[in-house]
Amino acid sequence: MDIDINLQRVTTSRADRFAKVIHIVAIVLLGSVTLLTVVFLVLGNTSSLSRLSQEETDLLARINKQNVKIARFSFIKERIVVGSTYFRDRSDIKGALAILRADIPDGVTLSSLSVNKREFSMSLSSFSGNLIHQYVTVFQTKTSKNPMFQSATVETVNFDKKSNKYEVNVKGVLRDSK
Amino acid sequence: MIVNNLKTFSFTLSFYRYKEHVISLGAIVVGLLLLVFFVVPQSQVYFAQKEEEQVLGEKNEVLSKNIALISSMNESTLEHQFTLASKAILSDKDYASVMDSISRAGQRSGVSLGDFAFTVGDLSNRSVTKGSDSSFTINILVKGKLGEIEKFIDSLSSQTPLVVITGVEVSQENASVHATFPYKQFSLKSFSSLDLLKDFTAEDKKMLSVFETWNVGW
């Protein structure tokens, strides 16, 4: 039987499904758009931006009254940072000096002494070879035991016939205390 | 004429046949247009607003914390610490303070002071970049016994302004002490009330107490 003779139009199931799908899509899309519009409108109206802006103005007014205190505080903080950096960097030159000049027996003269952050050198003289030997022994013992010294070497021991004097030169490396 | 009428009739017939499809498709197009030209910009505005809110909220929080911290500080204590810090670290090549410090150390230790050899570079160039820290070195010639020289170094190191002794050369009773004086100019640009201020840490307090000990004897 030819379907074209029916009074009621018979649609194919495929076209029917297509119609249903686009109908649903249209409803869902329009519904979503409406919902999203409403949601964003509501959320936009409940924004706390104006309250926060007012709060910011109030806080800035309050903090501006404390600007001198803040500047002072920041200044102190900054000085502390600089102070700490250089303070940490200070090496105990005075301590090294004290250790080096200690135990120099009477009769031994300290001719020169040089100490910096990394190394030291000194020269001593005496008319007595024994006293020089005594000092060198003590010096070697104390520098090997003291953690301040990384190394210490007796560079030269000379005898000057003209002056009848013994002279000793010692050098060494100081340990980085940082 | 008849053909045209037939075409119009055929189109009208098709429209009525697919009326539902056409309305649905139209609704989809309208929905998409609304989505693109209305909902998306609206959402962008909303999220931008949210972001601004967050930034402003954080800023207000920082401001509140800073106000709380600063308000909790005793004004006279802060003033005292400010004085200590100003004396402890030089703000520029302040030769007067340096010479005063050297003289005081000399008096305390008993050494005779010789010439000060300033190796600070161009004296006319007193201005330094604000906020940057720098230093200048002075070679101080002193005359005294080794114990006195030691005492001089100790005195100089334990009073204001901060000094770093970088070397000592002793020959007989003459010594050359190399002293480096750090300095830093304070820049207003380096602080902002919008930066979160942090209270003095234990280390900071330790440094402040060191400044305090240096200040004794002024």
Image (cartoon, rainbow, N blue to C red):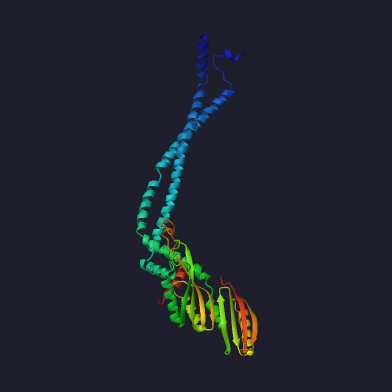
Residue B2 visible in image: yes
Q: Is residue B52 left or right of residue A124?
A: left
Q: Which residue sits furthest front?
A: A162
In the image, B169 versus A28, the foreground residue is: B169
Relative placement, left or right, of B7 versus B211 is right
Q: Residue at x 41, y 41 (%)?
A: A44
Q: How many marks can you see?
A: 0
Picture quadrant of residue A138: bottom right
Q: Can you say whether B131 is above or below B97 in the image?
A: above
Q: Nearer the viewer, residue A136 or A170?
A: A170
Q: Position of residue A39 (x, y in %)?
A: 44, 39
Of the 4 image quadrants, the one containing the C terminus of chain B is bottom left
> Residue A48 placed where, x, y %?
40, 46
Q: Position of residue B153 (x, y in %)?
A: 49, 78
Which sits in the foreground, A23 or B34?
B34
Depicted B63 relative to depicted A116: above or below: above
Name the residue rendered at 40%, 56% in the picture: B64
Residue at image position (59%, 21%) is A12
Image coords of residue A30 (percent x, y)? 48, 32
The correct choice, above or below, for B22 with respect to A52 in the image is above
Q: Residue furthest top?
A: B2
In-front residue for pair B205/B27: B205
Please tell me which residue is depicted at 38% across the width and 49% down the height of the picture: A53
Whether residue B202 appears in this view of the structure is: no
Q: Quadrant of residue B110?
A: bottom left
